[in-house]
Image: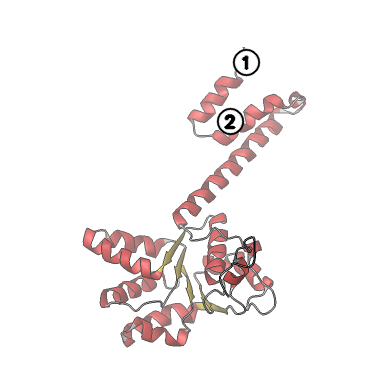
Amino acid sequence: MTLRQPNIDRLLQLGLSGMAEALEEQRDIADVDQLGFDDRLALMIEREAEHRDHKSYLGHLRQAQLRIRADIQDVDCRAGRGIARTTLTQLAAGDWIRQGHNLVLGGPTGSGKTFVACALAHQACRQHQSVLYRRVPELVAALTRARDKGTHERLMGRLGKVSLLVLDDWGLQGFSAEGRRDLLEIVEARHGRKSILVASQIPVERWPKVIGEPTIADAVLDRIVHNAYRIELTGESQRKRNKPPPLDGGDNRAPA
């Protein structure tokens, strides 16, 4: 009587599904008996490590709630885009996140800020970093709802703890008095410890006007910009490159 199936069942009960899969696959290896015990065990351990890494990545990706599941290799780094492939590769390594630095992505509408932000955030998930993506208008509304529901403190705690907080569409609308205070608390909690990635079509020089209160605006900028890498994306709108093909009978696409 073989113990292989009971062993597989026991591994699954213990939550070692990667090892169970590897052991089951060894049934189909004709010359598996030529491998020593240590070699077969090493294969199972390696599969378990891979399984756990992938599970961790999927968990971080799910919690990040990225707007786009973009990949670093798909970022357009052609001449005139404002970001070199070497710069992107260096950012993708993630040292700036581990060191608690910030990143400000600027550029006009359609320049690819959201795509680059989500690609870097996706890469951080692959490196088992906790990430949270939020459009600023939606975040402000969520904080207001949380205050009404009594969950404001819990949400603020989450915003302060993730390794990378992505704030997209920064500056599309102004901040209320409560929104300004929340913003200052968030950047203060993260300053020097956790990273913020801001994507905005509003130049940094105009941020004080968007934030409103000069004292709070100065404090926010001091905690974000002075500890940040800054990249200004340029070039033709990336959305124009994604226009649908013409319909039969002529070019029926929307004008550029």
Left or right, 215 with reference to 46: left
| Residue 153 placement: quadrant | bottom left
Instruction: Specify the quadrant of the image occupied by residue 18.
Output: top right
Question: In the depicted view, which residue is nearer to us: 98 or 218?
Answer: 218
- Residue 35 position in % (x across, y down): 75, 28
Identify the disc placed on residue 56.
Answer: none
Residue 112 placement (x, y as % from top left):
56, 71
**Placement of 36 over or under 171, stated as above or below:** above
Q: Nearer the viewer, residue 86 or 129?
A: 86
Q: Amino acid at mark 2?
A: Ala
Q: Please give the residue where the numbered disc 2 appears in the rendered image.
A: 20
Q: Secondary structure at mark 1?
A: loop
* Image position of 28 (left or right of 127): right
Q: Residue at left 58%, top 68%?
A: 253
What amino acid is at disc 1? Thr
Q: Mark 1 or mark 2: which comes first in sequence?
A: 1
Q: Residues within 10 Å of mark 1 (few under 14, many from 20)?
A: few
Characterize the local packing of mark 2: few (<14), some (14-19) or many (20 or more) Cα atoms within 10 angstroms: many
Task: Specify the color scheme.
Answer: secondary structure
Residue 127 position (above or below residue 199) = above
Query: For this view, does 43 lie left or right of residue 30?
Result: left
Residue 82, placed above or below residue 120: below
Question: Are discs 1 and 2 less than 8 Å apart at CB?
Answer: no
| Residue 193 visible to the viewer | no
**Residue 200 image point, x, y percent:** 47, 76
- Judging depth in this view, the residue of 251 and 170 nearest the camera is 251
Q: Which residue is mark 1?
A: 2
Residue occupying the far top of the picture:
1
Q: How far apart are the alpha carbons under marks 1 and 2?
A: 15 Å
